[in-house]
Image: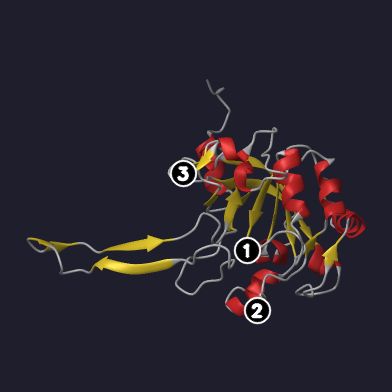
């Protein structure tokens, strides 16, 4: 029970400043070439189906689990045929039931401390160049300059500035080339026992590569990855610590899910 002076959570949340970290979904939006695009069409327009004077409109849309702002389930990657925890992928996967080990439906709502590490601003750039590999020294220096302390259980969001390219899909995807953390930086983060790492790029890690960061996070350490975030408003307001909120869809056997990612900052 709440004490006589305790303020209900919903009232505190109502006063919080909310940053929307997700991109909108629309036909032609950027998508990784190994995943299906977002497709949308109206199914019924107003006037097509009437109940007296009342009508409704509806649509059909199709998308992959890793399209737009999304979170990776731990079963998204394997190494040597093994998923996180040493489970053989061949034993738990099928085209009818997906991957039945650590799939996205096992990931609950995420309410965690989040931090922003704005590498682009620290490097004196609006947008990091395509060949910028973020190592542990750069990551640590940016975090220190912005007074960001990374703690166990955090969601660590890394800004490269590439969200500014979102409206130009060819530039944003760039034939799957772009800035991101390298394996050494990933190991620096995993040593701090974070819950998830995210960024504003399509691949999170530096690409092109053989995806060593995905393998290290998802397979070796059980750390989730969040991609295609919009971190521009957070960076503009210099908000480096917040409550990160995201709720994956409960897709049985799914390897990932779109999310509406939010950053909440409690009112003073």
Instruction: Please tell me whether mark 3 sits on a helix, a strand or a loop.
Output: loop
Front-lying residue, 35 or 61? 35
Q: Which residue lies furthest to the top in this view?
A: 1
User: Mark 2 to mark 1: distance in Å?
Assistant: 16 Å
Question: What numbered label is drawn on residue 171?
Answer: 2
Q: Can residue 17 be seen by looking at this rendering?
A: no
Q: Which residue is drawn at 24% across and 64% down?
A: 57
Which of 243/203 is in front? 203
Q: How crowded is mark 3: few (under 14 residues within 10 Å), some or many (20 or more)?
A: some
Q: Distance between the residues labelled 3 and 2?
A: 31 Å
Q: How far apart are marks 1 and 3 (CA)?
A: 24 Å
Q: Residue at label 3?
A: 251
* Mark 1 vs mark 3: in front: 3
Secondary structure of residue under mark 1: loop
* Image side of residue 7 versus residue 121, left or right: left
Whether label 2 touches label 1, CB < 8 Å: no
Q: In which quadrant of the rendered view does residue 27 lie?
A: bottom left
Tag 1 near tag 3, CB within 8 Å: no
User: What residue lies at 69% left-to-right and 32% top-to-bottom?
Assistant: 85
User: Which marked residue is nearer to the observer: mark 2 or mark 1?
Assistant: 2
Mark 2 or mark 3, which is nearer the start of the sequence?
2
Is 247 on the left-hand or right-hand side of 217?
A: left
Q: Which circle's residue, 1 or 3, is located before the other in the chain? A: 1
Residue at numbered disc 1: 230
The label shown at residue 122 is none
| Image spot of residue 73 (x, y percent) | 60, 44
Establish if 44 lies above or below 222: below
Rendered location of residue 76, percent (x, y):
61, 47
| Residue at the image point whose x is 45% and y is 41% from the top | 97
Secondary-structure class at tag 2: helix
């Amino acid at each position: 029970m709440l004490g006589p002076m305790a303020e209900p959570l919903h009232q505190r949340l109502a006063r919080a400043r909310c940053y929307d970290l997700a991109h909108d979904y629309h036909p032609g939006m950027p998508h990784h070439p190994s995943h299906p695009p977002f497709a949308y069409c109206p199914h019924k327009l107003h006037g097509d189906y009437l109940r007296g004077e009342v009508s409704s409109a509806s649509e059909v849309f199709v998308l992959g689990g890793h399209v737009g702002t999304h979170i990776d389930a731990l079963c998204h990657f394997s190494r040597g045929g093994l998923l996180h925890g040493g489970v053989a992928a061949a034993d738990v996967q099928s085209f009818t039931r997906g991957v039945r080990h650590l799939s996205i439906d096992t990931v609950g709502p995420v309410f965690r401390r989040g931090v922003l590490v704005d590498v682009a601003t620290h490097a004196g750039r609006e947008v990091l160049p395509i060949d910028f590999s973020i190592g542990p020294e750069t990551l640590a220096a940016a975090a220190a300059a912005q007074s960001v302390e990374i703690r166990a259980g955090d969601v660590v969001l890394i800004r490269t500035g590439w969200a500014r390219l979102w409206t130009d899909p060819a530039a944003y995807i760039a034939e799957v080339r772009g800035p991101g953390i390298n394996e050494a930086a990933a190991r620096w983060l995993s040593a701090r026992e974070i819950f998830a790492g995210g960024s504003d790029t399509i691949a999170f890690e530096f690409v092109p590569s053989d995806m060593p960061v995905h393998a290290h996070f998802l397979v070796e350490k059980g750390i989730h990855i969040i991609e295609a975030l919009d971190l521009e408003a957070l960076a503009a307001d210099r908000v480096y610590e917040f409550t990160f909120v995201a709720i994956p869809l409960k897709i049985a056997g799914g390897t990932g899910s779109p999310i509406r990612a939010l950053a909440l900052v409690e009112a003073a």
